[in-house]
Amino acid sequence: MIRDAGVVGAGGAGFPTDRKLDCKAEILIINGIECEPLLRTDRHVMETYAMEIVLAVRMIRDNLKAKRAVIALKKHYEKAVEALRDAVKGTKVELYLSDSFYPAGDEQNLVYCVTGRTVPTGGIPLDVGCVVSNVSTVLNIARALEGQPVTEKMVTVAGSVANPVTVNCAIGTPLSLLLDAAGGPVGDCTYIIGGPLMGRVTDDLSEPVTKTTGGLLAIPKGHTILSKKMLGERDAMLARAVCCQCSMCTQMCPRNAMGLDVQPHKAMRAFASGNGTLLGRVNGIFSCCDCGVCTYYACNFGLKPGKVMQEMKGALQKNGVRPVKEVKYKADSGIENKRVPTERLLQRLDLKKFDRDAPMAGFVDCDEVRIPLRMHIGAPDKPVVQAGQRVHKGDLIAEPQGMGARIHASIDGTVTRVTDQAIEIRK
C-alpha cells in the first residue's frame, strides 16, 4: 500500500519508503525534531495529526517486528508534545524529548541520542538495528493505508516575508504561489528551498513543490548566509592566507564527536595547498552530512570547511572511491558539551529576526501544476499519460524505472504537456 501510494522520505533525499520498511528492525524511530531552524512543518504535522501518526507508527512497528517505537521531537514543541502524549497513552509508543540544538534532527545524531549507538561510516541506521522515518512521511503512510496516494505537501514559508505561514499545497504548485500566501517578500530577496543551512539557493520561483520540499525562505540579498553557500577561488585564497589549522571545525563536528573521523581541518589543509594527499585518510569524509556546523559556527575566520568537504566527497565518489563501513573511535565523552544551541546559532548567523511563528494557513489553490518525474532517489519515472488526457486527483501518471516511487496527479484536469522531466496538468 505504501508503494502504491508513492510514499518517499518527506524529510530527506526521497528514498522510497516501501523499500526502507521492507526489513526487520529492533527499534523504530520517528523523526519529528525538524533539524533546520525557522521551519515549522513537522511541528504542525504532529500538533494536527497526532492520532493518525501514532496509529501508523504502531502498524509500522508491528511490520518491522520492532521491540521499541520512539517518536522524537523537541521539548519546546509544547502543543505537539501534549497532542502526542494523549495519542500514545496505552500504546507502548515512547516519546523522546530533545533539547534544542543543531543538528538535533540529523538521522545519525538521533539514533545516537535515542540508543547510544553510532551508525558506521557508509552505513545506515539498520546497521545498528534501527529504522528512522520522518514524521511527515509517517503521515503519508497513514494516508496510504487508507488508499490515498501522495498528492499534497505541507511547506513552511518564512524568512523576510510579510506573514510567515505553513501551508498545504498540491505537488507541482509553483513556489511563487506559496510566497504570495505569506504576503510576499519584504525587500529585495533571493530564496532558499529547505532550511537556511542545508537548503538550496534559487531565484526561480516557477520551480514546483515536490514530495520533499519542506520550506521556502526569503533571504535579503547580501545576507551572510547566502555567501557561505558558495565556494570559489577567493575562498581558496583565504584558506591559504588565514587557515591556521586550529582544528575548531573538527572539534565541533557532530559526526566526528560520534567517532566517525570527520576532520574538516584536514580538508582545509588539502584545499589551501592544492595537495590532495594532505587530506590523509579519506574514509571519514563520507560521514560528513553537510550540516555546516564547521562553516556556519565553528570557524572563527569565516572560512567554509563544510563546502570544501562536500566538494571533496563528490570528487572521491566520481573517481569511484567508496566508503569502508566502520566506526573509527568511541564517541566523545564530552559530546553533549559540543552541541550548538539553536538560539545561539541563529544569533550568530543574523537569522534570529526571522525566527517567527508560521501558523497553519490552509490550502494554496493552484490552477496548473508541473509535477517533476524525479522526486526521489533513482532515475526519473516513466509517464503513463499523454497530452490531452483527462485525469483526476490521485490517478497514477508515472511509474518508477527501477529505484523510484509512483507519481500521481495532484489536481483534477487535463494533461497539457509531457516531457522526460515533468508532467503538466491544468484544471
Image (tube, helix red, strand yellow):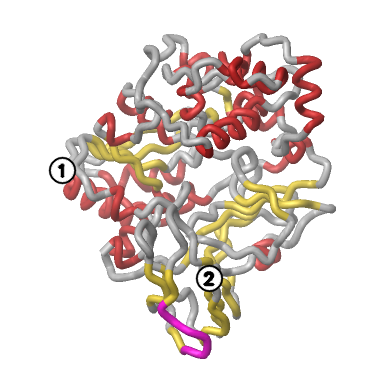
For residue 376, side relative to residue 30 (left or right): right
Under circle 1, the secondary element is loop
Overall secondary structure of the magenta stretch? Answer: loop
Q: Nearer the viewer, mark 1 or mark 2?
A: 2
Q: Which residue is mark 2?
A: 420
Q: Position of residue 148 (x, y in %)?
A: 34, 70
| Quadrant hosting residue 273 | top right
Residue drawn at point x = 39 percent, y = 13 percent: 329
Q: Amino acid at mark 2?
A: Asp
For residue 407, side relative to residue 159 (left or right): left
Q: Mark 1: give few (<14), some (14-19) or many (20+) Cα within 10 Å.
A: some
Q: Which residues are magenta?
A: 384-389
Q: Amino acid at mark 1?
A: Lys
| Quadrant hosting residue 308 | top right
Q: Position of residue 405 (x, y in %)?
A: 38, 62
Q: CA distance from mark 1 to mark 2?
A: 40 Å
Residue drawn at point x = 28 percent, y = 36 percent: 126
Residue sitting nearer the eye, 91 or 373: 373
Residue sitting nearer the eye, 246 or 178: 246
Q: Is residue 278 visible from the viewing direction of this image?
A: yes
